[in-house]
């Protein structure tokens, strides 16, 4: 499993997760154009993404979600409170996949287990990310 930090900080947060079979983003807080540029520098086309997992609705985590999701037809995994709180900033999404904190879910061959975090957002969460090869990363 590969983890690539595309951006971190108040200017925008986005993390690339890549396994043998899956490529996805955790948050997309940079502009859609900037995320595409940074992915291309890593030799990855945004069209390879299986989707975006959105941890909370702050602008430094959602700035590029709507544009990327619409341009590349990407589903967005997040919980209902985060979707509702961020819907004005994200606009219409091609597909929303609801998740529940405490209930693991899979994207391709990657298992993600969301856990509650204290933060000044609607219902923010962290993630434990696990590959089929047994590698784990906490975010």
Image (spheres, rainbow, N blue to C red):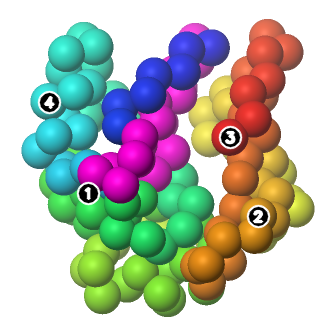
Q: Earlier in the sequence, mark 4 or mark 1?
A: 4
Q: Earlier in the sequence, mark 1 or mark 2?
A: 1
Q: Secondary structure at mark 2?
A: loop
Image-based side of 7 in relation to 117, left or right: left
**Front disc: 1 or 3:** 3
The span shown in magenta is: 8-28
Label at residue 139: 3
87 up-or-down from 26: above or below: below
Q: Earlier in the sequence, mark 4 or mark 3?
A: 4
Q: Earlier in the sequence, mark 2 or mark 4?
A: 4
Queried whether the magenta region covers residue 119, the answer comes back as no
Q: Which residue is mark 1?
A: 64
Label 4 and label 3: CA atoms lie apart by 23 Å
Q: Earlier in the sequence, mark 3 or mark 2?
A: 2
The picture places residue 114, in percent across and down from the top left corner, at: 77, 55
Please say whether residue 35 is visible from this viewpoint.
Answer: yes
Image-based side of 26 in relation to 135, left or right: left
Write the residue at 67% across / 27% down: 109
Write the residue at 26% across / 57% down: 64
The picture places residue 29, in percent across and down from the top left corner, at: 34, 54
27 up-or-down from 100: above or below: above
Q: Secondary structure at mark 3?
A: loop
Residue neighbourhood size for the residue with mark 3, other residues' Cα within 10 Å, grouped as few (<14), some (14–19), many (≥20):
few
Label at residue 37: 4
**Displayed quadrant of residue 69:** bottom left
Label at residue 92: none
Residues at badges 1 and 3 in contact (C-beta under 8 Å)?
Answer: no
Label at residue 117: 2
**Front disc: 2 or 4:** 2
Residues at badges 4 and 1 in contact (C-beta under 8 Å)?
Answer: no
């Amino acid at each position: 499993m590969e983890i690539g930090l595309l951006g971190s900080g108040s200017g925008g947060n986005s993390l690339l997760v890549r396994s043998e079979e899956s490529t996805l983003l955790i948050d997309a807080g940079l502009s859609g154009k900037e995320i595409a540029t940074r992915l291309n520098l890593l030799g990855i086309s945004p069209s390879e993404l299986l989707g975006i997992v959105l941890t909370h609705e702050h602008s430094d985590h959602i700035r590029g979600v709507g544009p990327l999701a619409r341009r590349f037809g990407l589903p967005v995994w997040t919980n209902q409170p985060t979707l509702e709180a961020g819907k004005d900033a994200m606009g219409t999404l091609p597909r929303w996949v609801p998740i529940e904190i405490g209930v693991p879910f899979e994207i391709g061959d990657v298992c993600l287990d969301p856990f509650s975090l204290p933060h000044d957002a609607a219902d923010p969460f962290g993630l434990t990310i696990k590959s089929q090869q047994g590698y784990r990363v906490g975010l």
